[in-house]
Amino acid sequence: MTETLVERQQHDHRIVQELLDERVELWTLYGSLGHLRPFAPGQPLESKLREFCQVLVDYISLGHFEVYPRLTDVPERRAKVQALANALYPDFVSATDAAVGFNDKYEGEWGQGLLNHLEADLSALGEALILRFDLEDQLIGAMAD
């Protein structure tokens, strides 16, 4: 069954809103991790870091596998939006790769050796997330035009 224009617009709006809601949750958790410095093994750092990694994966997955394909895979989508999405794609993938790399490094068991890198890794991830937020905002803006 093919989506009507109204159904597609409603679906797009729901997905974008879900992405923005997850972005707020992710950024809030990111900030809460920063408040746990200096980083030391144990609670609450371990539980906050695991929660952060789960939300990070959910957020990255939603953007990469739901929102972005929605912008580029619909043949009748406006050419302006598709051109912008295609131009931003390399940076989008780079930001996604940084988030996946962070998750892979910190989702499992870790000790003090890994914690010695957490502050620098969080900083680099924060920069990648800010880039991704900017790219998403550009795409959302183009969709609204």
Image (tube, rainbow, N blue to C red):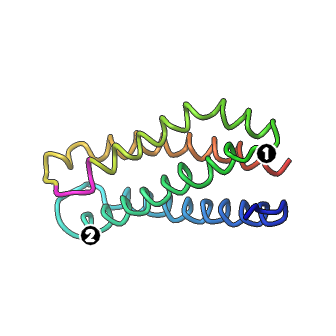
| 142 is higher (above) or lower (below) than 46 | above
Q: Where is residue 99 in the image (x, y as percent from the top left)?
A: 41, 46
| 83 is higher (above) or lower (below) than 71 | above
Circle 2: is it few (<14), some (14-19), or many (20+) Cα within 10 Å? few
**Disc 1 to disc 2, C-alpha distance:** 46 Å
Q: Classify residue 122 as left or right of residue 87.
A: left
What secondary structure is marked by label 1? loop
Q: Do the residues labelled 1 and 2 touch (CB within 8 Å)?
A: no
Q: Which of 131 and 90 is in front in this view?
A: 90
Q: Nearer the viewer, residue 39 or 9?
A: 9
Residue ID for mark 1: 77
Q: Position of residue 105 (x, y in %)?
A: 26, 47
Secondary structure character of the magenta stretch overall: loop
Q: Position of residue 81 (x, y in %)?
A: 76, 40
Residue stretch in magenta: 105-109
Residue at 38% from the left image edge and 46% from the top image edge: 100
What secondary structure is marked by label 2? loop
Quarter that holds the N terminus: bottom right
Residue at 43% from the left image edge and 62% from the top image edge: 55
* Residue type, mark 1 in image: Arg
Residue ID for mark 2: 44
Circle 1: is it few (<14), some (14-19), or many (20+) Cα within 10 Å? few
* Residue type, mark 2 in image: Pro
Q: In which quarter of the image is residue 21?
A: bottom right
